[in-house]
């Protein structure tokens, strides 16, 4: 069992000092993400029981085979890019061809990125496809060419995307909120589109957002976004759990490079996001997900061996105990427990995220701590 802190990512869409309660430092600059894992894009530093850096990285001890998940705390002040993540096959193939020099800087690693966001506060997102009729109504109101709108209405969304990017202009992007209102969308969505215009007035990718479904998550609710599902997180603070990959294929709302052709190949028109109306304490276990999460506020939980486990303290206090001893977490630190480590017990008073890999057989224990401790 090791203790880590998050590696800070200062992407421009982050909230100024938004992750200070967990990063432990005010920088006066955007703090977008804290990474807990071994991905080379942001390897987590190890800390001792007192929260002091040991000078080592988690990656000095484990590789991606042992740490198959990447966990993040995310603070979004404004919309993140419209993006899609590649499937295992697409990522492996894309990485191979990139290694042969066919293109550069598209793929970050050869792995699938499948992710879930658990809202820690109210969280807004675009995820998955909007109904064809609603999307077409909004594009009609924007004055987009009838043949492109017809493709959308027929459900041929991917074929419509190049035409939408061509049709984008600052004048059209400025009309997004008005078009949302004209299409009869509720006020919260009109406001979301106004936010897109405010932050990305010149970005052609803004014309993709009418294709995307809108979601508002309350604290404790979650959305699972499999590889292939388009999304753009709009605003809020959340916990993100994903396979250990940084493969992001962007279509817009970004200063980073967009790779429309790669994104079009990665997009699925059949997969959908799974929205889970859970509350703190519920087990969050999306269908076919490679991980399971429980956000515990009080009490205890046994987390059995034979799967990778990471326990991240968000608020308050938590202790993690195994036959090797006991550690006390501070907010923003996480206990990393490898599959070969023994059963462990978490006791929380605050908010603690317990994340387990499901790539191996996992037995889920639902005992409360007093029962578990008795057994232990
Ligand atoms: Zn994503």
Image (cartoon, grey):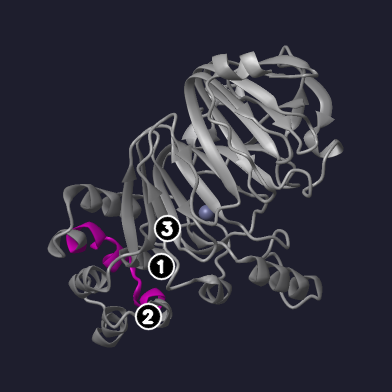
**Contact between labelled residues 1 and 3, with CB atoms less than 8 Å apart:** no
Q: Nearer the viewer, residue 95 or 250?
A: 95
**Residue placed under numbered mark 3 in the picture:** 273
Rounded to the nearest angstrom, the CA distance separating label 3 from label 2 is 21 Å
Q: Which residue is mark 1?
A: 204
Circles 1 and 2: CB distance less than 8 Å? no
Seen in the picture, residue 348 relative to 225 is either above or below; the reply is: above
**Ligand 1 lies under 8 Å from the Cβ of mark 2:** no
Q: Earlier in the sequence, mark 3 or mark 1?
A: 1
The magenta-colored residue range is 164-179
The vertical placement of 348 against 15, above or below, is above
Asked whether 217 or 357 is in front, the reply is: 357
Please give the name of the residue rendered at 54% of the width and 25% of the height, measured from the top-left corner.
367
5, above or below 128, in the image:
above
The earlier-in-sequence mark between 3 and 2 is 2
The residue positioned farthest toward the bottom in the image shown: 147
The x and y percentages for residue 247 are 63, 59
Q: Secondary structure at mark 3?
A: loop
Q: Is residue 329 visible?
A: no
- Asked if residue 71 is among those painted magenta in the image, a careful observer would answer no
Quarter of the rendering occupied by the N terminus: top right
Q: Nearer the viewer, residue 112 or 373?
A: 373
| 201 displayed left or right of 306 | left
Q: Quadrant of residue 309?
A: top right
* Residue designated by label 2: 160
List x then y, in percent, for residue 336: 72, 31
Q: Is mark 3 within 8 Å of ligand 1?
A: no
Q: Looking at the magenta stretch, what is its main secondary structure? A: helix
174 within the magenta span:
yes
CA gap, disc 1 and disc 2: 14 Å
- Where residue 212 appears, as percent x and y from the top left, is 35, 63
Q: Is residue 93 visible from the viewing direction of this image?
A: yes
């Amino acid at each position: 069992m090791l203790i880590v802190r998050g590696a800070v990512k200062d992407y421009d869409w982050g909230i100024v000092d938004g992750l200070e309660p967990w990063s432990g430092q005010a920088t006066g600059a955007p703090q977008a993400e804290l990474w807990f894992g071994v991905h080379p894009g942001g390897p987590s530093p190890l800390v001792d029981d007192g929260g002091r850096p040991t000078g080592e990285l988690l990656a000095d001890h484990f590789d991606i085979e042992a740490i198959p998940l990447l966990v993040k705390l995310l603070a979004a002040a404004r919309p993140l890019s419209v993006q899609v993540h590649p499937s295992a096959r697409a990522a492996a193939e894309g990485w191979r061809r990139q290694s042969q020099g066919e293109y550069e800087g598209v793929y970050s690693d050869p792995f699938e990125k499948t992710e879930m966001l658990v809202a820690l506060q109210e969280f807004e997102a675009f995820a998955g496809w909007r109904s064809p009729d609603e999307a077409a109504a909004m594009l009609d109101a924007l004055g987009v060419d009838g043949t492109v709108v017809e493709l959308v209405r027929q459900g041929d969304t991917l074929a419509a995307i190049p035409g939408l990017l061509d049709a984008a202009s600052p004048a059209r992007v400025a009309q997004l909120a008005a078009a949302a209102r004209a299409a009869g969308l509720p006020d919260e969505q009109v406001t979301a589109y106004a936010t897109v215009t405010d932050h990305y007035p010149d970005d052609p990718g803004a014309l993709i957002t009418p294709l995307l479904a809108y979601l508002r998550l309350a604290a404790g609710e979650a959305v699972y976004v499999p590889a292939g599902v388009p999304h753009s997180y709009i605003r809020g603070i959340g916990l993100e759990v994903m396979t250990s990959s940084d493969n992001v294929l962007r279509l817009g709302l970004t200063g980073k490079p967009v790779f429309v052709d790669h994104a079009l190949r990665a997009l699925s028109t059949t997969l959908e996001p799974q929205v889970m109306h859970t509350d703190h304490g519920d087990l969050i276990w999306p269908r076919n997900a490679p991980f399971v999460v429980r956000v515990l506020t009080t009490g205890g939980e046994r987390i059995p061996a034979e799967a990778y486990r990471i326990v991240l303290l968000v608020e308050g206090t938590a202790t993690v105990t195994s036959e090797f001893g006991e550690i006390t977490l501070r907010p923003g630190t996480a206990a990393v427990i490898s599959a070969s480590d023994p059963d462990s017990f978490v006791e929380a008073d605050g908010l603690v995220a317990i994340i387990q890999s499901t790539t191996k057989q996992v037995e889920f224990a639902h005992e409360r701590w007093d029962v578990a401790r008795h057994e232990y």
